[in-house]
Amino acid sequence: MTLTAAAGLTPGLLSANTPDPGSLRQSIVAWCWRSFGTKWSLEQVCQAARDSGCQSVELVTPDEWPTLKKYGLACAIATNNTGWAKGFNNPAIIDEVRSLTTKAIEDAAKEGIGSVIGFVGSKYIKPGDPKSGVIARDEGYKHCVKTLKEMAKVAEKHKVTLCIEHLNSRDDSHPMKGHPEYMGDNLDEVVNLIKEVGSPRIKILFDIYHVQIMHGDLIRRIKQLGDLIGHVHTAGNPGRCELDPNQEIQYKPVIQALWNSGYRGFIGHEFLPTRDAMGGLIQAVTTCAISG
């Protein structure tokens, strides 16, 4: 659909709160196409979303939501504006993280956006600086539980789900293929802290690529987690590439397992294009087109 045609749609973000009972909706994670390879503008990302059959462009800031509105797209999950290294594990920066996340939840609620991303955070006291010292893992998780119990009250009040992302710490080949300093690299530990918080508004962001690298056993884990999964990301492994036959994850049965488990949220495509970007996106959307 062209921009002219999209402009005729009803203004306002499509609701990300109301699940489609007939299919898993799909989304583009904007930064992959804006920062690497193609370096598309946000307008181009929105156009690609419409042309490929995606219903959302995600992890964009509030000042960019009007562009999504022009295309009749949802924002499946909003950024909390901290970045992955600044998380709930670090008492040295927790005031900043808490403040930014609270504002992100409030802004999302005003626009009908159902989810906001969050992170455990870097293991270093000063993210990016190993010389600053390391946060003890058990202490970091205690801080996460304490602060997330506070954030849960905000999320519950505004009916927005805060999704904590598990990331891999094994791939050090590229700044966005892996995060060696990330403390939330063990899925079981992240799930346990979410269970300890005990709120329906604090869930896991299940990134299939990161889970595959750290743990594998994707389908069994999906079945075990059930409704603790609040959002899903995709990418091919190794390399955070397209969802094609050259990578190791069998996406069809994995996505089917999500559907069978009762997941009815969005699938966000978060891979780094290595070839024709539109062709790779259409392939990903086709691969993940699971419905009842």
Image (cartoon, rainbow, N blue to C red):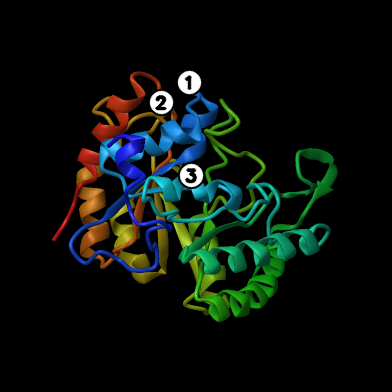
Q: Residue at x 57, y 27 (%)?
A: 174
Residue 227 x %, y %: 36, 70
Q: Is residue 59 visible?
A: no
Measured Cα–Cα span from mark 1 to mark 2: 6 Å
| Left or right: 2, with 209 as reference point | left
Q: Is residue 81 visible?
A: yes
Write down the residue under mark 2. 273
Write down the residue under mark 1. 37
Q: Is residue 15 above or below residue 152?
A: above
Residue 181 x %, y %: 67, 42
Q: Secondary structure at mark 3?
A: helix
| Left or right: 126, with 171 as reference point | right
Q: Secondary structure at mark 2?
A: loop
Q: Amino acid at mark 1?
A: Gly
Measured Cα–Cα span from mark 1 to mark 3: 22 Å
Residue at the extreme right of the image, as rendered = 132
